[in-house]
Amino acid sequence: MTPIEIAYFKHFMYDKGLEKSFQYYYRKNPVKVNQRSNVNVNPESIEQYLLQTSVEDVIMKAFTFYLSGTALRETCTFDYWKNIDDQWQKYMRSMADNFSNDSWPQLRRTFAILRQNWDVPGYWRKENFESTEEVYKRMNINLPLPENCWEHGWNVKAPKEEKVETAITEIMDADFEESHASDVPEIEFVEFDNNHRVVNSLTRGIMSVNTRNHSWRVTINRTDTKEIKKKQVKYAMVGNTKSGETMIMLCNNSKGIPLTYNSDDYYNINSRQFCDHLRRLLSISDDLAYLRIEKVSEKMDSITYKVTRQ
């Protein structure tokens, strides 16, 4: 698989809570050349396997399966993993034209997960994340190192006119927090009772809160809407982290407010409750406000954004 495909595979496994199960069976039930042979078909290294396999084969040719009814655990059966594989194939088709794919050599955000070496004990710990150079070497990537690359030990090649501390902070906040797909910020969300054209100026990373003429509408820009739509989410939730940061999650939690996909290809959140809570959390007094949204976490069926005032 390509680095892009490997990154999505690792995110997919994390999102499903299957990364350790996959690794366990890969090592415990290796595929043999034949029934009488002790020779494994796949390499001992999982990372090497990911490089030499394909999107179509990565799950179903990773290890030996048991037939349903003959196994002590369903999680080691063919039917179980075939169902997972069907979801994986669908997931990859949805990611084929992701806007961020071209930026993978930076090993940032979605692709920071490539810094995790699944052959290393404790690979999920930040202190074990590999440097850009180490990742390139392990994955046989023949590209020049990015100008601003992360080196093992938190040594950062900072831009000439920026401080090293700033570069470190950016990498810590924007990259590595997203490298573990299940690390969602602890947010105290507001629960809502479901019973109850300014958009043309919106650019990527911007949304509006409009209460003029009692409209009570949040509108997300078209570019981010396109990405959110791939998740097939139906609801929006808003809340604050313990550190006071305001977050919006687009998800399938029915305790949120329903999303509306309008004819102009924008997502709207039409709710006075939602608008009131968002305005209160960010101390907004204007009847029309433009806010910045920055993606901080992405899972199979949700995207979480940090919201700040411009």
Image (cartoon, rainbow, N blue to C red):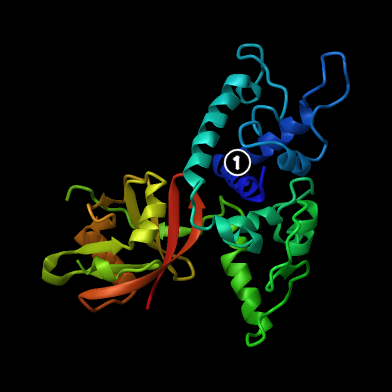
The reply to whether residue 281 is visible in this rendering is: yes
Is the residue marked by circle 1 packed among few (<14), some (14-19), or many (20+) residues within 10 Å?
Answer: some
In this picture, residue 261 sits left or right of residue 110: left
| Residue placed furthest toward the bottom | 161
Looking at the picture, how far across and down is residue 8, in whole percent? 59, 47
Front residue of 199/294: it is 199
Q: Which residue is mark 1?
A: 13
Q: Give the residue furthest to the top.
A: 69
| Residue 189 visible within the image | no
For the N terminus, which image quadrant? Answer: top right
75 w.r.t. 271: above or below? above
Q: Is 132 left, or right, of 74 in this rendering?
A: right
For label 1, the SS is: helix
Q: Is residue 286 above or below residue 197?
A: below
Under mark 1, the amino acid is Met
Residue at (65%, 40%) from the top-left corner? 19
Residue 301, above or below 66: below
Q: Is residue 290 left or right of residue 123?
A: left
